[in-house]
Amino acid sequence: MSRNLKENYYNVKNKIEEAEKASKYKKDVTLIAVSKTKPVSDIQEVYDLGQRDFGENKVQELLQKYDELPKDIRWHLIGHLQTNKVKQVIGKTYLIHSVDSLHLASVISAEAVKKNITVDILVQVNISEDENKYGVSNEDVIQLIKDISILPNINIKGLMTIGKNTENRHEIQQYFADLFKLSIDIKALNIDNVCMNFLSMGMSSDYDLAILEGSNMIRIGTGIFGDRNYL
Ligand SMILES: *Cc1c(COP(=O)(O)O)cnc(C)c1O
């Protein structure tokens, strides 16, 4: 992957536009630039191209970048959130994508009450029932949403999933279609404090398929910033 962030960024933007046109759902897709492991200088470069939504998967890294970068960035926490980190991060996120238990939601709610703010979240669903993934199971998702919906100062804005890790593109697409259908079913329940405005699905390798199946929020790391080096 090239180090030319500008070229990468516009390539992704063009591919999103093509997928939006090809999709029967005709959604406006929000691009989240996933900057985990990348330096603030890279983020600033993409910010200067007009990008405002950035995603991080670790609380510590998000907080550090939050302090150093412009305050109009919308920070998305996309990785697993431990309850002992909730206190530090809430109030700094635009959206938390990874809520998958009532316990975590209760801790977020309690901290939000203390700070007198409202926290917007997505419920992460393990739609492909992959045992290595976080996310609530398909079986439990509706009950979890009902339980979270009665907690104060926390609003469910939609669903998130991570595409199945397989070479089979058709299978990946099928699971995205399943999550879309699930979001429609949940919307039809008209639960108080629950809306299904956001469907966060699609990453560098599969966002075209996700948009075809109704995603309106995609999380792109490698496709913009290039490969990540984990130490
Ligand atoms: C890292 C990450 C992404 C971005 O992955 P790429 O394949 O680099 O686009 C998206 N979503 C989550 C939850 C991630 O952790």
Image (cartoon, rainbow, N blue to C red):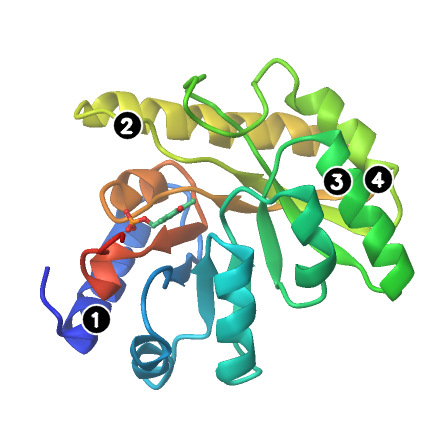
User: In the rendering, at what x and y percent does residue 140 appear?
Assistant: 66, 17
In the rendering, at what x and y percent does residue 224 appear? 24, 64
Residue assigned mark 4? 192
Drawn side of residue 49 relative to residue 77, left or right: left
How many other residues sit within 10 Å of disc 3, few (<14), some (14-19) or many (≥20)? many
Between 60 and 123, the residue placed more toward the observer is 60
Rounded to the nearest angstrom, the CA distance separating label 1 from label 4 is 39 Å
Question: Please, is residue 99 above or below residue 138 in the view?
Answer: below
- Sequence-first disc among 2 and 4: 2
**What's the residue at 72%, 38% (across, down)?**
104
Which residue position is annotated with label 3? 105
Front of the two marks 1 and 2: 2
Looking at the rendered structure, the secondary structure element under dot 3 is helix
The residue identified by callout 1 is 10
Q: Confirm if mark 2 falls within 8 A of ligand 1.
A: no
Name the image quarter holding the N terminus: bottom left
Label 4 vs 3, first from the N-terminus: 3
* Dots 4, 3 in contact, CB < 8 A: no
Tell me the residue at 67%/34% (across/down).
187
The amino acid beneath tag 1 is: Tyr
Secondary structure under the numbered disc 2 in the rendered image: loop
Label 4: state its secondary structure: loop
Mark 2 crowd level (few <14, some 14–19, many ≥20, 10 Å Cα):
few
Q: Nearer the viewer, mark 4 or mark 3?
A: 3
Residue bearing the label numbered 2: 165
Q: Is residue 153 visible to the viewer in this orientation of the structure?
A: no
The Cα atoms of the two marked residues, 2 and 4, are separated by 34 Å
Q: State whether residue 87 is above or below residue 47.
A: above
Measure the alpha-carbon separation of dots 1 and 2: 26 Å
